[in-house]
Image (cartoon, grey):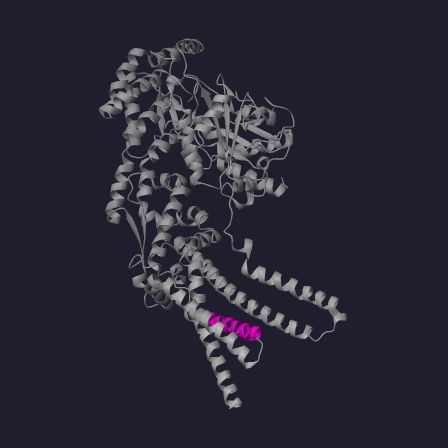
Amino acid sequence: MGRRGGERGRLAHVALVALVVLCWLPLVVVITAWRTVLNPAFYSQSLNRADAFDRVYTQVLPDPAVDTLLAGLPIDSSLVTANLRTVLPPSTIQAMTDEQINRIVAYLRADTDDVELAVDLRPIFDNISGLANRYVAGELGAGTSYQVTTVQEFTHGVVTALDDIAAGRPPKSLPTIELSPQDTDRVLPVVLDRVDADTRARIEAPLRALLRSGNIAGALALVGPEVFRGDETAIGRLQVYLHGSTLDLGVRLSDLRDRPMIVAIDRLHDVAATLVWVSLLLALIMTAAMVSIVVLAGRRGVSRVRAATGAVVLAGVGAGLLGVVLRIALPNPLTSLDRSSSPLPPGAGAVLVDFSSRAYGTLESDFLRIVAWTLVAGLVGYGLSRLVAVSARWNRTGRRRRVATAFALAAPLMIIVTWTAFPGAAAEARKLCNSQQALCDRRYDQVSYLATHNAMATSEDRFLGPAQDPAITHQLDLGVRALLLDVHHWTSPTQVDAYLQTLPPATRDALAPLTRGARSERPGTWLCHDLCQLGSLDFVAELTRVRDWMNRNPTEVVTLIIQDNEVPASEIAGGVAAAGLAGMVTTPPEDPHGRWPTLREMVASGRRLVVFTERQDLPGTFLRSFYRYAEDTPFDAKKPEDLRTCARNRGVDGASLLLMNHWLTAAAPSRRAALGANAAETVFTRAQRCRQERGRIPTFVAVDFATIGDAQAAVDRLNRVRGGAGS
């Protein structure tokens, strides 16, 4: 009877262990699924590891197959591809990617019946519709000019240039002539006739001033975006081509259901609604089985701990074998997307295949991590049980040796278990700082940043005599990370008169009509250049837009260098706080030669905004005078030769920050001058001159018309040089 009872006990033990294993196998799959394919962060992590966002610009959009999509545009497709970060800025890519991720996760969670890999192009359409405002104006600097002798010739030349702009072509040359007030009145109606009545009323006064002052490029930059309708036509044609606003990538799960991995995904979709309840039921059954194993072991007179941990080890072994079977039976279904038969452009296919490989690797590693944890937990428990059994036989004189042995075994086991269960940084997504991983561990003062001079004075915001074309947040989209801003109180009639007296007579006559009725009672602080009547932005409102941009781009570090003029530092600090930026501002080191934080530290803390004023300090706050920490080069270069030196202008010698003012000063900012000054080799050569003369590479490279030339490429090259030099 005892032998039969023992046999039944062993059979019951085997059955209970089998039940534990059978419950644990689906639980491992479910736990892995919740940690990976049912978690949106899993996809974001895999995209980062595949460098997918960077490769959109370097591999997907430049693909020749994409040109087919752009071939029907009524503008040169190179105008779009050359400005990809404007048509498709990183924030738009992130939003579009999140849309696809949410579709996949919604399907897997049984919220939808199918997954259609399609892209909503409406955000791109919005960006294309603003392309003219930012770039048709910028292209005006690339042409030549020719002298005309009559108003009729001049008018014909202007109309021809407008025809080119309306067709999406930057004019190759612009007429020049000195217009009298009467001549201006003859030309103005011809130009205004090209726009609607509302636009006519809005631009007439500044257009008159630009024509009168001889700034033909500025006049066309003002009116050009209004006559250019290529962007709207392009959107219309793309919508016809796409049958709406959605680009169908040609891939649906329903089309791939003959593939084993998709079948498995379908099964997950089918059971997702009941997944939580099934998991709870399996966990309860497994717990009951484990309790039964322990009780049965006690009745059989064997170790309860070894009986339970043995079941855990077998569950881990079973899960490992299941992983091998799943790996063989469920290959990556997206590997075919980079073949010639793929419906996707080769560049896009390669990125998706790389992404899927990374995702597959993460899926496998998570599954194996759970398996390893199960095995380690079981083996540790089993080993400790054996250790206790052996130690019971030791006499009292061996107590110290037993303690030492326990510590010797426990410490490495704890390390192994901790590493297995909590892999830490190995599971983290790639961290970027200012769009580059290489910059993260450099201090703030060891990085070069592209800066825009008079960043607020833009043609997009209709400043008269703009220094930039895109608005401030669009400059940030393009890679600008330092903004040189002028803050004023509203200019009074006395200030207006004083300013006009400094101008040449012709320019004064052109601008005077725009300043009539100047009021000094407008409250608050404003971003203006010289006269607020010629262009202004509300200081707090614009900083609020910067805050929103920084929230959308949480790994970017931005610097504001404010020419404070007559505005007290307390008002500037108050404007920063009113815009909701107080929690993002970092305080410079008290010692101007002290240690700055690294970009990684700034990103991690959330304090990614540095705000300087040119003249004032506000003790006890983040607001410090720029020239306590920096020196700069002269800002009044008149000819290209002046941009070849690196003489010190303001600030203290040997400061940790260096601002390279790299623009030509004239009556108004010149696109033509920017074309040469902003050439990548020109910028880089001067920066290297600074390195020789001043012992440091410029921290800030400030330019006019940052969208003309390729100053950003020069700044990227400077950061590579810094990395190679270890600075």
Which residue is pictured at 53% across the width and 67% down the height?
374
x then y, percent, for residue 302: 57, 79
Q: Please say whether residue 525 is one of the residues in the magenta stretch.
A: no
* Quadrant of residue 384 within the rendered picture: bottom right
x then y, percent, for residue 375: 55, 69
Residue 259 showing in the rendered view:
yes
Q: Is residue 403 above or below residue 539?
A: below
Q: Please say whether residue 322 is one of the residues in the magenta stretch.
A: yes
* Quadrant of residue 79 within the rendered picture: top left
| Dominant secondary structure of the residues highlighted in magenta in the image | helix
Q: How many marks?
A: 0
Viewer-closest of 177 and 445: 445
x then y, percent, for residue 649: 59, 21
Q: Is residue 438 above or below residue 611?
A: below
Residue 503 showing in the rendered view:
no
Q: Is residue 710 left or right of residue 244?
A: right
Which residue is pictured at 46% across the width and 73% down the height?
289
Q: Is residue 193 above or below residue 72?
A: above
Q: Is residue 357 above or below residue 475?
A: below
Viewer-closest of 203 and 302: 302
- Magenta residues, start to end: 304-324
Task: Tell me the quarter of the image containing the C terminus.
Answer: top right
Q: Is residue 487 left or right of residue 416?
A: left
* Quadrant of residue 213 within the rendered picture: top left
x then y, percent, for residue 440: 55, 43
